[in-house]
């Protein structure tokens, strides 16, 4: 019996020892305190454009709890020390001091503070004392001043990204800075001011795989001299350069990613030697390509190709020999005539994104539009000279297409049926005629723009059943009848533009079920109704255009008061309203109390400076608004990025003039 007790006790002790050895240690209190101190030194703002997730908001107050379980924090499982901190795009706003508490995290191996707003602070000198760092990313976070020289002592670094956005960082001696960083595999020093040429010392960096040296905003041509050492990097497979491009670049046979945007390149390029290339971005150059027909055996296996604004006058012949192309962008060139059949011979099964907009294309010939392209999800053919679809067909055999833009062409046909999975469908500014009932077959639309055509018939009530519809623009057509009372449940519409049609009857009261509505343009119709004071229940409304209709009667309040608190524009001109203009109406226009310059009126303009690139391709919605001011008609623009229009919040200017004429 005693031996059994000893055996049982031994097993319990053994299990306790195993459990203790397997249990993860908690975060060290001093490191937890340092993290909380860092959190308290910043304001968290989700209004920042680059903000994705306010990571530190999930951290427990006063340092309670195990910081190793906090978002963005990584710890060593054996010691419990904080070894990784990822606060990229974390909505941090404020100054970061030279003695920031992060410098107390002496066991850090990875630190990512990219895409925050540190308000032009200097990079903390103490970061150079984090001797264990292997990964450091401070890109796009509004740092300024000189890069601390002691960062060059971080000899364990394998990845360093100090790229700036506004050329506000300065590195006095690049050669002294990089000489100790011989373990680097990834280096990005884009848009940093450097007084001296980039040193040939990088030829000794045998582990370097990724090199990014974009310098669009700086006057210093720091890529000068690269040709002496670029070919000596045996593992380089990712290269993004601007400035002087060396001839030796075409000898880098191991490159997989090559970006040479905005380099003033000219002449003919031969891609035969870059056999491993999968991504090629040559936007904003002036180039042409070798056109021999025996390149199919030696061409790279490209999956992404962007030749935006390259002054191309024809389709590059090598496109016909590519197998596996997924993304192609030839927009903003001077390509004329038909889209050739041979262009998609090898990629019709793989192509997902195609942009041929802003060219001089006239027809499809017998092109890809008649071929099975099962993976195509994005197609932009806008701003060309297209007159019809292949064989006069109006139903496109593109089963996976979600984005289709054929606006600003010369199409003269009935309305093509949008693809069943379409989210974005824009065929505005053409010569379309006939009814629009074919829209009813699509239930996933977010943006529908059929404006500036000759479409007739009535507006189908089925539009009220498209739960995802955010933008509806049917303006400048020949639509007639009543606006359907179709929104019988909550809708997410933000923009409704029905201007310049032949619509009659009252404004449908079912619009009250669209609480997100910001812009309503019903001008230049034959709408017969009293003043729609009930619209004030839609508290997000910014603009109401009712001009040139048959509105009548006095302007009366809705339930004894007006509530147009967010309204910036109201145009009631050229109607049959009578009586006095109620002071309560004007008093409810709280958003109009601060007036911008009268010399240059701006209506709902949210210019964000968004880059039009493969990484972030943002479309812009533009609408003309003709507003009355003291009897004179002025045309203003309604201009917003689509990303904002489909997001939960839309940041507009704080104040706009009112155009109100009775």
Image (tube, rainbow, N blue to C red):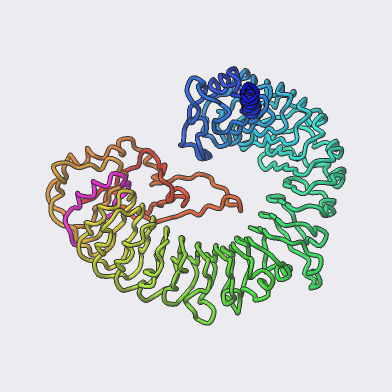
Residue 84 position (above or below residue 342)? above
Q: Nearer the viewer, residue 643 or 310?
A: 643
Q: Nearer the viewer, residue 346 or 553?
A: 346
Tell how many labels. 0
Q: Which residues are magenta?
A: 528-546
Q: Quick check: is 536 in the magenta stretch?
A: yes
Q: Residue at x 47, y 69 (%)?
A: 419
Q: Quick check: is 35 in the magenta stretch?
A: no
Q: Nearer the viewer, residue 363 or 102?
A: 102
Q: Residue at x 67, y 37 (%)?
A: 163
Place of residue 183 in the rendered image (x, y in percent of width and height, measured from the top left): 80, 35
In the displayed structure image, the side of residue 291 where residue 611 appears, left or right: left
Residue 342 position (above or below residue 16)? below
Place of residue 238 in the rendered image (x, y in percent of width and height, measured from the top left): 74, 48
In the displayed structure image, the side of residue 327 where residue 536 appears, left or right: left
In the displayed structure image, the side of residue 497 where residue 26 appears, left or right: right
Place of residue 403 in the rendered image (x, y in percent of width and height, measured from the top left): 50, 62
- In the rendered image, the residue lying farthest to the bottom is 391
Q: Is residue 632 visible?
A: no
Q: Is residue 251 visible?
A: yes
- Residue 345, by quadrant, is bottom right
Q: Nearer the viewer, residue 353 or 601?
A: 353
Q: Residue at x 79, y 73 (%)?
A: 293
Place of residue 220 in the rendered image (x, y in percent of width and height, measured from the top left): 73, 37
In the rendered image, the quadrant that contains the N terminus is: top right
């Amino acid at each position: 019996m005693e031996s059994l007790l000893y055996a049982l006790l031994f097993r319990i002790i053994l299990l306790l020892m195993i459990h203790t050895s397997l249990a993860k240690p908690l975060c060290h209190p001093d490191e937890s305190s340092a993290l909380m101190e860092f959190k308290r030194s910043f304001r968290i703002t989700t209004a920042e454009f680059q903000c994705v997730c306010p990571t530190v908001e999930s951290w427990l107050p006063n340092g309670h709890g195990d910081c190793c379980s906090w978002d963005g924090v990584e710890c060593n499982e054996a010691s419990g020390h904080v070894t990784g901190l990822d606060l990229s795009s974390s909505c941090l706003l404020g100054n970061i001091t030279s003695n920031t508490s992060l410098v107390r995290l002496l066991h850090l191996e990875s630190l990512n503070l990219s895409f925050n707003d540190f308000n032009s602070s200097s990079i903390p000198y103490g970061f150079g004392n984090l001797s264990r760092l292997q990964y450091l990313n401070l890109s796009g976070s509004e740092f300024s001043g000189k890069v601390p020289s002691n960062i060059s002592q971080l000899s364990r670094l394998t990845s360093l990204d100090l790229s700036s956005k506004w050329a506000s960082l300065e590195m006095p001696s690049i050669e002294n800075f990089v000489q100790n960083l011989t373990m680097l595999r990834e280096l990005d020093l884009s848009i940093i001011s450097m007084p001296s040429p980039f040193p040939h010392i990088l030829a000794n960096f045998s582990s370097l795989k990724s090199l990014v040296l974009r310098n669009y905003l700086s006057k210093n041509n720091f890529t000068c001299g690269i040709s002496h050492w670029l070919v000596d990097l045996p593992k380089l497979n990712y290269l993004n350069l601007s400035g002087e491009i060396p001839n030796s670049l075409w000898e880098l046979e191991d490159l997989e990613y090559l970006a040479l945007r905005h380099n003033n390149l000219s002449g003919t390029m031969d891609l035969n030697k870059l056999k491993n290339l999968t991504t090629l971005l040559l936007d904003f150059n002036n180039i042409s390509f070798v056109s021999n027909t025996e390149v199919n055996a030696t061409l790279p296996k490209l999956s992404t190709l962007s030749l935006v604004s390259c002054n191309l006058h024809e389709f590059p012949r090598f496109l016909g020999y590519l197998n596996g192309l997924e993304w192609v962008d030839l927009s903003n060139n001077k390509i004329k005539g038909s889209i050739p059949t041979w262009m998609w011979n090898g990629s019709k099964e793989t192509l997902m994104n195609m942009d041929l907009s802003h060219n001089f294309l006239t027809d499809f010939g017998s092109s890809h539009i008649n071929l099975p392209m099962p993976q195509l999800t994005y197609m932009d053919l806008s701003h060309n000279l297209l007159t019809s679809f292949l064989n006069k067909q109006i139903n496109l055999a593109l089963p996976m297409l979600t984005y289709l833009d054929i606006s600003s062409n010369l199409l003269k046909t009935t309305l093509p049926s949008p693809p069943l999975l379409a989210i974005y469908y824009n065929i505005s500014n053409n010569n379309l005629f006939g009814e629009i009932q074919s829209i009813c077959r699509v239930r996933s639309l977010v943006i529908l723009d059929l404006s500036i055509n000759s479409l007739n018939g009535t507006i189908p009530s089925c539009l009220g059943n498209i739960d995802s519809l955010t933008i509806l623009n049917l303006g400048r057509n020949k639509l007639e009848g009543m606006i359907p009372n179709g929104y019988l449940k909550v809708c997410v519409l933000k923009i409704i533009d029905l201007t310049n049609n032949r619509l009659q009857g009252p404004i449908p009261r079912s619009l009250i079920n669209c609480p997100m509505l910001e812009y309503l343009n019903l001008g230049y119709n034959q709408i017969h109704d009293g003043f729609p004071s009930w619209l004030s229940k839609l508290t997000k409304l910014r603009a109401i255009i009712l001009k040139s209709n048959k509105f009548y009667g006095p302007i009366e309040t809705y339930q004894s008061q007006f509530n147009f608190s967010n309204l910036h524009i109201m145009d009631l001109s050229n109607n049959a309203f009578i009586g006095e203009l109620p002071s309560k109406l004007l008093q409810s226009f709280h958003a109009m109390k601060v007036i911008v310059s009268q010399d240059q009126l701006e209506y709902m303009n949210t210019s964000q400076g968004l880059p039009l690139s493969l990484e972030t391709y943002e479309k812009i919605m533009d609408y003309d608004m003709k507003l009355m001011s003291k009897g004179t008609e002025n045309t203003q623009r309604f201009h917003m990025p689509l990303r904002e229009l489909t997001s939960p919040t839309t940041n507009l200017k704080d104040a706009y003039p009112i155009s109100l004429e009775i």
